[in-house]
Image (cartoon, rainbow, N blue to C red):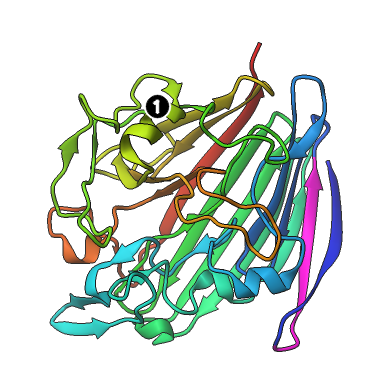
Amino acid sequence: MKVSNFDFGTTKSGEDIKGITVDNENGIAISVINYGATLISCKIADRKGKSEECVLGFDNISDYENHGAFFGATIGRVGNRIANARYSLDGADYSLSINDQGCNHLHGGTKGFDKVLWDLASVNEKNDRASITCTYFSPDGEENYPGNLTVEVQYILTESGQLILEYKAETDKKTPINLTNHSYWNFSGDQKEKIDSHRLQIEAESYLPVGDVSIPTGEIRSVKNTAFDFRELKEIGPALETSGGFDHNFNLSLEKSQKAEHRMYVDHRGSGRAMEILTTEPGVQFYTGNSLHEIEGKEFNKHDALCLETQMYPDSVNKENFPSIILNPGELYRQRTIHNFFLLD
């Protein structure tokens, strides 16, 4: 394993941004910066051995600061949407910042975990893996969430072709928490194609229908005979034509798992690249880049990439029939998501 450090510029407020790159011997390299504990690059070799970029991102810190696509960022304190930017906990009402569609709280708010500086605490090298550890202290009242919260995210790259994301968190007051990673994947390599020809499988029997402002209605609906049925491997293109695009939670389970077992899969036959995802989380937000657009000359457009954000259900703090996202003092929040990269025959 090869590990190297790099500088990634300076923020508007004068903070130096640092990054770490880890390469394995099989043509996979990841780069993470301390701004937002963000995965800015994931290069993967195709079946001809050519290593190319497979996630969307920027070349400088200014673009990450100025644009809200959440490319590759660690999302928190609560990922996804909270209806009307408010919730109640133990009789207390909490009003949150509104940063989505004029009424919702999205991805932790105006300054969520994607916009703060994390500590790149260490890189631990072993025979078959190297890990980048990112830590952050979120003070009581940040974005009006209760409790002092300590958070750790590890990016672990193995020689066998795994990218493992491990999350931990502890609090001194009851608080909601729902962490995820917001990488946009495109396995054609260097964004040669849209995602229409990618094939996808999500082992989910149901999904969460949403209303006009993308908040789940509370219904848990079967995927059977709908465009949301990805139980069998199929091309994304026809489903995109039927649906117009996806930004929905698929229910992998009603419970968190103690080990990463809930499954998704995506591949691109042209390049031969394939990825299996296993997670402890009961849900995954499947997003098809519906709002992507050209950003200062960089070509990002609708359906250029897809996100598979492993997480708890959206708006769980306001839906009694959804799994709870409340973390109590003395408890340890844990999440593990494994990306297995491999090549098709």
Task: Say above or below: 282 vs 160.
Answer: below
Task: Say whether residue 293 is left or right of residue 308.
Answer: right
The residue sitting at 28% across, 58% down in the picture is 214
Task: Say above or below: 58 vs 95.
Answer: above
SS for callout 1: helix
Q: Which residues are magenta?
A: 13-23
Residue 30 place in picture, x, y as percent: 73, 47
Residue 226: tell me if it is visible: yes
- Which quadrant would the N terminus be assigned to in this image? top right
Task: Say whether residue 138 is left or right of residue 90.
Answer: right
Asked whether 145 or 40 is in front, the reply is: 40
The quarter of the displayed image where residue 317 is located: bottom left
The residue sitting at 59% across, 31% down in the picture is 340
The quarter of the displayed image where residue 85 is located: bottom left
Q: Is residue 162 magenta?
A: no
The residue sitting at 33% across, 79% down in the picture is 173
Q: What kind of residue is marked 1?
A: Pro
Q: Which residue is mark 1?
A: 238
